Image: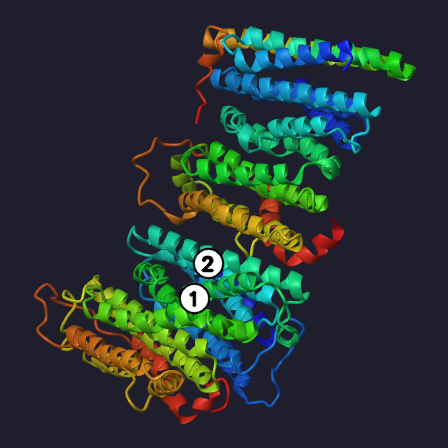
Amino acid sequence: MLKIILPTAMLLPMALLSPPKTMWMNTTTYSLLIALISLQWLTPSYYPSKNLTLWTGIDQISTPLLALSCWFLPLMILASQGHLQHEPHTRKRTFISALIIIQPFIMLAFSATELILFYIAFEATLIPTLILITRWGNQPERLSAGIYLLFYTLISSLPLLIAILFLHSKTGTLHLPILKLTPPNPTTQWSNLVSNLALLVAFMVKAPLYGLHLWLPKAHVEAPIAGSMLLAALLLKLGGYGIMRITLLMGPSSSHLCYPFLTLALWGALMTSSICLRQTDLKSLIAYSSVSHMGLVIAASMIQTHWSFSGAMILMISHGLTSSMLFCLANTNYERTHSRILILTRGLQPLLPLMSTWWLLANMTNMALPPTTNLMAELTIMVSLFNWSFPTIILTGTATLLTASYTLYMLLSTQRGTLPTHITSTPNSNTREHLLMTLHIIPLLALILKPELISGTPL
Amino acid sequence: MSPFHFSFYTAFTLSSLGLAFHRTHFISALLCLESMMLSMFIPLSLWPIENLTPSFTLVPILMLAFSACEAGTGLAMLVASTRTHGSDHLHTLNLLQC
Amino acid sequence: MNPHAKLIISLSLITGTTITISSNHWIMAWTGLEINTLAIIPLISKSHHPRAIEASIKYFLTQSAASALILFSSMINAWSTGQWDITQLNNPVSCLMMTMAIAIKLGLAPFHFWFPEVLQGSSLTTALLLSTLMKLPPTILLLLTSQSLNPSLLTLLAISSAVLGGWMGLNQTQTRKILAFSSISHLGWMIVIIIYNPKLTLLTFIIYTTLTSAVFLSLNQSKILKLSTMLISWTKTPMLNATLMLTLLSLAGLPPLTGFMPKWLIIQELTKQEMTPTATIITLLSLLGLFFYLRLAYHSTITLPPNTSNHMKLWYTNKTPNTSTAILTTLSTLLLPLSPLIITMT
C-alpha cells in the first residue's frame, strides 16, 4: 500500500520543484509509472484482502477502483494542459499540485479498513475539489457551484460521522473486518433506523441519488476539465463504494430501508434520462447521464446479491472511463468554440474528423453496445433487479431506451448537421487529445476480454 | 435570613438592577458599579469577625483597593468619552453596532 | 504606545491570567480577573478614536459587572458553606449566578452582545488577545467548577451560542466581527463538553487559540479589516492568502485539517454520554459557521478579480511574514495526523 501512496505523495515535491520546461512531462510520466505499478493489485487472490496492513486492506471491491484512481491522475494532468497554457507558470504548478493532493486521499478512502480513517479521507477530497472547481472554473456561477458541492456533501456526511461514532460507542470498534463479526447491536428499532439512514445518506448524496443530485450538474458544468473528470470518474465512485461497504454492515434491518432508495434510484434513472433529452448544455447532459447510470449502481448495491454487486462494480469502472471520456471530448469542443451550448457547437465532423471517431466510440460505450463492459454491467444489473422483482424491468428497460436515445441525440447534434455560421476556423485537434482519448478507450475495450478483473466477486 | 444578610443582598440586587435598567448616563452606571462593590465590602469585613479568621482581614482592603482602581479607570473613560463623544450619554455609543 | 507602558500592561496581563488559573481561593481568582480587565483597557483605548473609546467602555462595563457578580456569588457560597474553595461551589443559587457571570465574561450566547462590538473597536492584535488570552481565565474557572454546574443549562447555553454565532456571522462584512461570531460558536463547542470531559474543553481551547491566532496574525499582516480589502490583498501576499484559506477552512472544522480534531473528539464524547441528539444539532449548526468561513476563503484566494480599479489603492509595503505566523499556520493545518499523540498528552 505504501509502495503506491508514498510515491504519489512524492509527486507533490516533484511538481513543485521540477523546472518549468519539463514539469508537465515529469508529472505525467511519473504518475503513469505509478499507474503501471498499481496494476499489480489486480492479481487475483483467494484471501479476503490482499496487502492487509494495520489500517488499510485491499479486497476485490477496492482493487479496480484503486487501479482506476491511479490511472486517472496522468489523464487529468494530460487533459488540463490545454486550458492552462495561457496561465502563468506558478498557477500551473498550483493546479497540478491540487490535482496531486487529492490522489492519496482517494486511495486512502478506497483502501481504509477503519471507518474513521475512511471518513476523514472521504471528506478530505472535498477541499481540493472545491479549490479545483471554484478557483479554476470559468464562469462566476462556479462560486455557487462550490457552495452547493460543499453543503450538500457536508449536510449529509456530518450525520454519517455521528452515526460512525455512535457505532463506535456501541460496538467498541470501527475496524471493518471485526465490525462484520460483531452481532447487531440491541438498540431500539427507531435509533437503529435513524443510524442506518445516517450511514447511507452521505453516500447517496455523493453517488448521487436522484433527488439529492442537484449539486452534481452545477459542479460539472462549472468545473475545469480535470475537475469534471475527477468528479465523474472517482468521487462518484466513492459514493457507490461507500454504499457497498455500509450495506454489508447494516444487516437485515436495512431490508425495508432499501425501498425508498431503490424507488428513487430507478425512477431517477428514468427521470434524468428524460432530462438529458431536453438538455441544451453539453456538460450538463453528460452530468445527468452520470446521475442516471449511478442510479443503476445504487439500485444494484441496495439489493445486495452477488450478481448485483459485480454488476455495480463493472458499471462503476466502465461508467468512470466512459463519462470521463465524454467530458474530455466536450472539453475539446469547448476549448475550440468556447461554448457548451449544443446548438452552437453542432456539426463538428467536417472540422475535426478524427475527433468524431472518438465521439462515436465514446457514445457507443455510453449507450452500452455489445463489445463493451457497459453492456455486461447493465445486463447483470437488470437481470438481478428482475430477479428481485419483476416490474423493475419496465423502469430499467425504459431507462435503457432513453439512454440510447439521448446518447444518439448527443452524437448527432454535436457531429452531424450543418456547421453553424459563426464557426469559421478552429485549431486542429492535436496529438495530446488523441492520446487522451486513446488512453480512455483502451481500458474500456480491453476489459471485456477479462471482466473478472473489475467484477468484485468472481463471476 | 438574618437582617444583615438581607441588607447586603438587597443592596447588591438594587444596585445591579440600577446598572441594568438605568442606562442614560455613564456616570450613573459607574456609581451603580461602585455601590455593588461597596455592598460587598460589608459581608467581606464581617466574615473574619464571624468566623474568627484574622488572616482574612486583609481581604476587604484588597477588594476596596481594586474597586478604587476600577472606579479610577471608569472615571478616566468618562473623561475620554466626554472628549470623543461630547457627552457621557450611553446611547451615543452606537458606532460599533452590528 | 510607550514601551514601558506596554511592558507593564503585558506583564500584568500575564500576571492576572496566571493568578486566576492557579488560584484556589475565590478572592484571588477575582483579583486576577480584575487585573486582567484593568490591563486590557489601555490596550483597547490606546488609539484615541471614538470607536476605541466606545469599545473600551462597553468592555469595562460588562467585565466589571460580571466580576462583581462572580465575587457576589462566591460570597453567597462562602456564607452558606463556610469556605472559599473554587472547586467546592455547592450552593445552587451561587452556582447559577456563577454560570451567568462567567457566560457574561466569555460572551456566551444570551450574553454575547458586547463581544463583536468590542472586537470591532479594537485593533487586530488586541482583538486576538480579547478572543484568546482574555477568555482563558473564565474558561478555567468554569473548568474548576464543572462538577457542580447544571448540565442542561450549559447545554442550552452551548447550543444557543452555536446558533447565534453561526447565524449572526452570516450577515457581517467586517473580518473582526466575523471572527468574533466564530469565537462565540467555538465557545459553544467548548461549553457543551465541559461537564463530561473538562480536559477536552482545554484541548479545544488550545486548538482554537492556535487556529484563531493564525487567522488574526495573517489578517494583521496585510491589515485586512473588511472583506473588500481581503479581495485585493492577494496582490500583496499571495502565499499567505492561500494558507489563510486553509486556516479558515480548518477553523470551520473540515476533515483533513486540524480543526476537525476537537469536533471529532467532542462528538465522540457526546455520543458516549448518550447525547447523540445534542451532538447532531451542534454539528449541523457548525455548517452555519462554515458558510461565512467559506465566504472569507472565497475572498481570500479563490476569486481573483481581474483588476483592482474599484478599490482605493492600498499602500504596498514589502513586509515579510513573520515566523510565528508561519508556525501557527502550519500547526493549524497539519496537526490532525498527530491527534492520537495529542489525546494522550492532554
Q: 10 Å neighbourhood of mark 2: few (<14), some, or many (≥20)?
A: many
- Quadrant of image for the N terminus of chain C: top right
Q: Residue under circle 1? A: A204
**CB under 8 Å between callouts 2 and 1?**
yes
Q: Residue at x 10, y 71 (%)?
A: A419
Where residue A244 appears, as percent x and y from the top left, is 49, 75
Asked whether A402 or C251 is in front, the reply is A402
Asked whether A83 or C43 is in front, the reply is C43
The way the protein has been coloured in the rendering is: rainbow
Q: 10 Å neighbourhood of mark 1: few (<14), some, or many (≥20)?
A: many
Q: Is residue A240 left or right of residue B19?
A: left
Q: Residue under circle 2? A: A156
Where residue A311 appears, as percent x and y from the top left, is 41, 84
Q: Amino acid at mark 2?
A: Ser
Disc 2 and disc 1: Cα gap in Å? 9 Å
Residue C192 occupies quadrant: top right
Name which of mark 2 and mark 1 comes first in the sequence: 2
Where residue C172 appears, as percent x and y from the top left, is 42, 34
Q: Answer above or below: position of C155 versus A158.
A: above
Residue A56 occupies quadrant: bottom right
Asked whether A394 or C113 is in front, the reply is A394
Q: Residue at x 36, y 32 (%)?
A: C313
